Amino acid sequence: MKLIVFKRLLIVCLALTSVFEAGARTTKPKVYFKLLEAYTQRTVAGREGGMANTDYHFVIIWQGAAYPETFFWRGENGFLPCNIEKVSKITKRTANLPKGMDYQVLEGMGDQLKKGDTLILTPVKGGKFAVPAEVPEKAKNTLFFKTGTSGWLSYAVKKIAKKQDIMAP
């Protein structure tokens, strides 16, 4: 009799344990892109008296099914729209490429973005853009983006490297 009661209690305990484990599982957050590198790079004027310009760049591999509609960078200097360009890593250096340039822009991108494409995002300076209500005011060093099927999504950039200066012609 005691053995039967013990077996039934054991079965109930195992059943409850499996129910609690199943309820504790969470779904993985959806991954839209992988950040390969984030960096600043200064372009130095090739002639005397020219102005130097420092830009932010974010190189990503797009992993979402729907392509990105827009990207914005929320840095220390406001909410800036980003140019989105398809790029490839430069493997063979030619004489006409400046030192410090690691990616080459591919022409004719259009709406042909797809999963696995390498993209470079460059914030565009100038102009005033209203910050959407969904974007937290305190968010800094964060990429905000939308796809055709999503609302505003964000990705906090933790480390931004400083790359070698590029000398303009």
Image (tube, grey):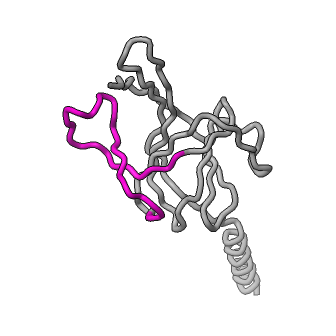
Membership of 49 in magenta stretch: no
Front residue of 68/27: it is: 68
Residue drawn 75% across the image and 37% down it? 138
From the viewer's side, name the closer residue of 17 and 169. 169
Query: Magenta span: helix, strand or loop, mainly?
Result: loop
Magenta segment:
83-112
Q: Residue 82: where, in percent of width, then height?
A: 56, 45
Q: Do we see residue 114 in this rendering?
A: no
Query: Dividing the image into 4 quarters, which one contains the C terminus?
Result: top left
Residue drawn where x is 44% and y is 12% of the image: 49
**Which residue is rendered at x = 69% and y = 60% of the image?**
151
Q: Is residue 98 magenta?
A: yes
Q: Is residue 72 visible?
A: yes
Q: Position of residue 146 (x, y in %)?
A: 63, 57
Q: Nearer the viewer, residue 13 or 16?
A: 16
| Residue sitting at x 69%, y 55% | 152
Work out whether 168 lies above or below 119: above
The N terminus, quarter of image? bottom right
Question: Is 90 rendered above or below residue 167?
Answer: below
Q: Extreme right residue here?
A: 133
Question: Where is 41 relative to 142, above or below?
Answer: above
Q: Position of residue 127 (x, y in %)?
A: 66, 37
Say left or right for 30 vs 120. right
